[in-house]
């Protein structure tokens, strides 16, 4: 009996020791306090990385190719190869840079400050706020690779004034919307001041071009827009005026869109040119000072002498090699005349 009591007494300290929690350092496991500290440090590092990642540019891009056939040739071609970089500098300040690799050039480079829904500011090089298609339908959204002839000839794609700027220019713009509904504003506006010389080109005169656009969206998917452009291009301060109106319904599988664009362009050789585009996208050029004298035989394809008043009866593929404008002022051609007349493409 005595040995058993001694054995029990000797085991008591070990049992008491075993009943106590072992120190973390002895067991090699972190304590709750250490785990909490590590978790907080991890959160801090994650938060810092998230802030850095939020400032990095978002990279995207696309390629557009096509095939073209004519009576004299057939070819594959690459229309656009774009790389887009966009990001946020601050909560209400962002930027965008877009590079075109087909004929390398910067097509977009701007910053935007958006303090309020009703008032925002944009500075740099970007799409002119003129017409629905030029403003709201980027190449990835537009139904075709090529934009309509009316937009190309009157809004700086292959403009009658000589500009080739993909509908863009360098300048500053105010824009905003009122009466916000779910995802859109009922009334929107854009007002900008631009160089008027195209992509990456300094202004060649002291004048600045003005562009204004007013948009009404009475219901989701439907917009009615009116646009106005006034400017002077080149060192000779040649006039460049554009105005247009359009309507578009784009909701779900249904898209219906129509625009009318008209304008007046000063010509380097003197005189002015009126251009009218109807809703079908056909473009007519009409000399503002009608030709009152007969044209020389070599001025028209086909080599026959034609008086100005006979020109509307000629084929639509008529090309004027040279545009002659008499010195004396003649009656101006009205919109109705231009709409029912002919298509003339300047060389």
Image (cartoon, rainbow, N blue to C red):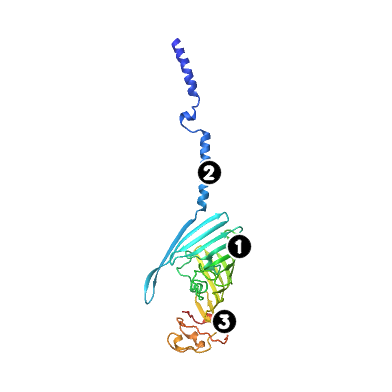
Side of 318 relative to 132 (left or right):
left
The correct choice, above or below, for 137 with respect to 329 in the image is: above
**Disc 2/disc 1 C-alpha distance (Å):** 39 Å
Mark 3, secondary structure of its residue: loop
Q: Which residue is mark 2?
A: 44
- Image quadrant occupied by the N terminus: top left
Q: Position of residue 237 (x, y in %)?
A: 56, 76
Residue under label 3, please give it. 334
C-beta proximity under 8 Å, tags 2 and 3: no
Q: Is residue 49 above or below residue 341?
A: above
Q: Which residue is mark 1?
A: 177
Instruction: Give the distance between the C-alpha atoms of the residues marked 2 and 3, in whole angstroms.
Output: 70 Å
Which of the two residues, 303 or 124, is positioned nearer the viewer here?
Answer: 124
Question: Which tag, 2 or 3, sits closer to the chain's start?
Answer: 2
Where disc 2 sits, the SS reads: helix
* Residue 190: quarter of image: bottom right
């Amino acid at each position: 009996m005595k040995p058993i009591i001694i054995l029990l007494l000797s085991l008591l300290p070990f049992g008491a020791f075993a009943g106590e929690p072992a120190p973390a350092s002895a067991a090699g496991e972190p304590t709750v306090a250490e785990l909490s500290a590590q978790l907080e440090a991890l959160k801090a590092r994650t938060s810092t990385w998230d802030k850095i990642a939020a400032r990095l540019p978002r990279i995207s891009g696309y390629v557009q190719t096509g095939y073209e056939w004519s009576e004299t040739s057939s070819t594959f071609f690459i229309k656009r190869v774009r790389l887009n970089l966009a990001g946020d500098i601050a909560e209400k300040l962002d930027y965008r840079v877009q590079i075109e690799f087909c004929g390398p050039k910067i097509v977009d480079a701007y910053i935007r400050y958006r303090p309020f829904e009703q008032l925002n500011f944009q500075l740099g090089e970007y799409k002119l706020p003129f017409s629905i298609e030029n403003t709201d339908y980027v190449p990835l959204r537009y139904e075709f690779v090529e934009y309509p002839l009316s937009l190309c000839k009157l809004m700086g794609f292959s403009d009658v004034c000589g500009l080739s700027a993909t509908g863009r220019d360098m300048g500053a713009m105010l824009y905003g919307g009122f009466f916000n509904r779910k995802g859109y504003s009922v009334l929107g506006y854009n007002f900008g001041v631009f160089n008027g010389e195209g992509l990456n080109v300094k202004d060649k005169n002291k004048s600045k071009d003005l562009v204004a656009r007013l948009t009404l969206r009475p219901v989701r998917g439907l917009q009615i827009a009116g646009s106005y452009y006034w400017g002077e291009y080149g060192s000779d301060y040649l006039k460049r005026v554009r105005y247009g109106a359009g309507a578009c319904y784009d909701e779900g599988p249904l898209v219906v869109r129509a625009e009318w664009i008209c304008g007046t362009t000063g010509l380097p050789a003197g005189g002015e040119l009126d251009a009218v585009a109807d809703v079908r996208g056909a473009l007519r050029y009409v000399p503002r000072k009608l030709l009152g004298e007969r044209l020389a035989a070599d001025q028209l394809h086909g080599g026959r002498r034609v008086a100005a008043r006979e020109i509307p009866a000629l084929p639509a593929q008529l090309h004027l090699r040279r545009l002659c404008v008499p010195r004396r002022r003649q009656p101006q051609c009205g919109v109705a005349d231009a709409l029912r007349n002919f298509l003339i493409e300047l060389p």
